[in-house]
């Protein structure tokens, strides 16, 4: 059974940095998958942030984080990362990771948002002075 465990969140001042991690276990198609980060701010719908494909290393970022966030993965450790720099108060949210087949793209993020019913516990990121 697939399990994901997110970590690395915390309280940071605007302009600061955090590095999130997501460890994936129990995957049956890890070498064909896409891993992605999602977030949900209080009172808002969950949104896709970024994704990365296993085979091609292709990445995608939603516009609001482009140039500030960097997604990466260590396939040997079954771990996904999200380096977040120049953090803004509007980045405050619970961050989740997810895995599925397909190709990393905006459409993949939307597909997972619509299809996924079970999520991990997430990791809280709070950007505040």
Image (cartoon, helix red, strand yellow):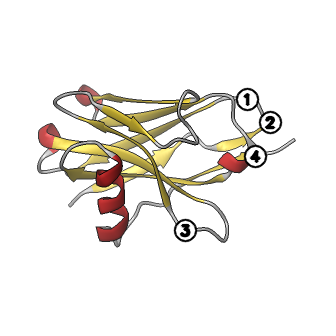
Q: Position of residue 103 (x, y in %)?
A: 21, 43
Q: Say which residue label 2 marks.
A: 13
Q: Earlier in the sequence, mark 2 or mark 3?
A: 2
Q: Give the label, 4 or 1, closer to the camera.
A: 4
Tag 2–tag 1 contact (CB < 8 Å): yes
Q: Residue at x 35, y 48 (%)?
A: 106
Q: Give the label, 4 or 2, closer to the camera.
A: 4
* Secondary structure category for the residue under label 1: loop
Q: Disc 3 to disc 4, how far (Cα)? A: 17 Å
Q: Disc 4 to disc 2, how far (Cα)? A: 8 Å
Q: Earlier in the sequence, mark 3 or mark 1?
A: 1
Q: Earlier in the sequence, mark 4 or mark 1?
A: 1
Q: Residue furthest right?
A: 129
Instruction: Give the left or right position of residue 31, taking residue 111 as reference.
Output: left
Q: Residue at x 32, y 60 (%)?
A: 112
Tag 4–tag 1 contact (CB < 8 Å): no
- For mark 4, does the 10 Å Cα neighbourhood hold few (<14), some (14 to 19), or many (20 or more) residues? some
Q: Disc 4 to disc 1, how far (Cα)? A: 10 Å
* Secondary structure category for the residue under label 4: helix
Q: Earlier in the sequence, mark 4 or mark 2?
A: 2
Q: Position of residue 33 (x, y in %)?
A: 19, 44
Q: Say which residue label 1 marks.
A: 16
Q: Disc 2 to disc 1, how far (Cα)? A: 5 Å
């Amino acid at each position: 059974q697939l399990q994901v465990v997110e970590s690395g969140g915390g309280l940071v001042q605007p302009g600061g940095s955090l590095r999130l991690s997501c460890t994936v276990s129990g995957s049956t198609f890890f070498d064909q998958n896409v891993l992605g980060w999602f977030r949900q701010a209080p009172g808002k719908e969950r949104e896709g942030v970024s994704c990365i494909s296993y085979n091609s290393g292709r990445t995608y970022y939603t516009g609001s984080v482009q140039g500030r966030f960097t997604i990466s993965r260590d396939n040997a450790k079954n771990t996904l990362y999200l380096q977040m720099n120049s953090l803004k108060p509007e980045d405050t949210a619970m961050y989740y990771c997810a895995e599925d087949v397909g190709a990393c793209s905006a459409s993949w993020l939307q597909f997972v948002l619509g299809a996924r019913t079970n999520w991990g516990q997430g990791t809280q990121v709070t950007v505040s002075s």
